[in-house]
Amino acid sequence: MIKKSLLAIGALLVLFPTLAFADDPSAAQLDMGLNAIWVMVAAVLVLLMQGGFILLEAGSTRMKNAGHVAGKTIFTLGLCSLIYWAVGYGFAFGTEASDSLNKFIGIGNFMFEPGLAAGDGDGYPASIFFVFQLAFAAVSLSIAWGGFAERAKLSAYLIFTVIFTAVIYPMIAHWIWGGGWLATDGAQDYAGSTVVHLTGAMAAFAATILLKPRIGKFNKDGSANEILGHNQVFTALAVLLLWVGWFGFNAGSALAVGDGFFGYVAFNTQLGAAGGAVAALLISWLVKGKADITAMLNGALAGLVAITASCAYVEPWAAVVIGLVAGVLVFFSSVFFEKIKVDDPIFALSVHGAAGVWGTLSNGLFATEELVGLGVGKPGLFYGGGGDQLWVQFESVVVCGAFAFAASFLVLWIVKKAIGFRVTEEQEIIGLDLSEHGNYGYPEQMKKVGTSV
């Protein structure tokens, strides 16, 4: 045991060499180093979720668009990073605005300069917190791309990335996480069921409406055709990568390791995901007579989305219930959206939208008095808090969802009128790999099968 402790301290000194030159590293310095390591690891896990999104979107769409999916994800991640550094982080977490303005938007920290180390009293360097928050913004943006899939121009991705990362996402993040008016009201969204997932889903919803369905998705009589993705193994691997990355997403939001609370958050996260996967598979089996793999994969993600808001505020049994309900909800909501002729190839509206709403509202039901004491707001309805917290959660869902949808719709409507939003029918048929990038992601395979895939 002593040997392991010495090895851990040695590793810490290698990673944070300034501690090696201190005459007697204090407990506070060691805590700061451990916190910094954990938050940085969590940030990396969340950034690696982009690999999951590449595989999820590519596997869920046709091979003639696979290279486009991969390339535009890397491009938009790079552009998102630059815009978030320049202005987005400042609007989300800036502290220079007047009290009245700060309720709605942050001001300050534009073209963010974090300094080389943590300041006095800080738990970790500001640069690490920035990278962590940037990773969250990038996830929300990737969720939005679900509504663009297989029919949007690359130029629309560029323009929307700039506006979404600069203004839309940061404003909602500020309202709940940056000391804005919903934070003052006591809104509980520990790691982003609303801030990240619902925001991205509402942007996707705006895109699906303006783009209209893919060619061949719906018949003249209104019935739907199933447009299968080209690689379900990719999709399953994507879900596993996202599942692992989610521990950075949720447990990383503890921002500290000292009392081990991040382990409790991870524990609830695992239970929520498991409940979602099992419930979705079983309900699809019951309704369709077949155990639908796509439904099960969506259920796992829906469970993760739903538990994201409440992982730090609820008991384990409630985490299971939240996941189970999310699994059932994602199945029926996907059926509903198809019936109203919304073409959502990646199921962003169901997985991140419907489950995000449920996850946020669930705090108003299951948040315990003990755990709320560690965070914000009040206990839920089932723990003696009455309907107060449920109302605040409902308020945050409605306001944030409406703002994200309206702002995204306005931006994309302007794009549509100014330069066009959707590729031509010919370009959509031959695929975005060739029409937008000049080559296929699967060049040898596509030469064999033509453009009918």
Image (cartoon, grey):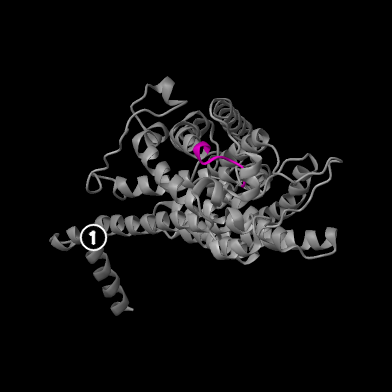
**In the image, what residue occupies the spot 39% across and 35% down?**
93
Between residues 375 and 333, which one lies in front from this camera angle? 333
Against 277, is 164 above or below?
Answer: above
Against 195, is 324 above or below?
Answer: below
Between residues 312 and 146, which one lies in front from this camera angle? 146
Look at the image and tell me whether residue 13 can be seen.
Answer: yes
Between residues 377 and 359, which one lies in front from this camera angle? 359
Membership of 151 in magenta stretch: yes
Residue 24 % position (x, y): 16, 61
Q: How many marks?
A: 1
Between residues 51 and 375, which one lies in front from this camera angle? 51
Look at the image and tell me whether residue 319 can be seen.
Answer: no
Task: Name the residue tied to disc 1.
Answer: 16
Residue 235 % position (x, y): 61, 61
Against 97, is 246 above or below?
Answer: below
Image quadrant in which you'd find residue 22: bottom left
Residue 218 % position (x, y): 78, 44
**In the image, what residue occupies the spot 49% across and 35% down?**
164
Span of residues in magenta:
150-156
- Which residue is farthest right? 221
Judge from the rendering whether residue 237 lies leftward or rightward of residue 48; answer left or right. Answer: right
**In the image, what residue occupies the spot 55% across and 37% down?**
187
User: Quadrant where the C terminus lies?
Assistant: bottom right
Few, some or many residues within 10 Å of mark 1 (<14, 14–19, 20+): some
Q: Amino acid at mark 1?
A: Phe
Residue 256 % position (x, y): 39, 54
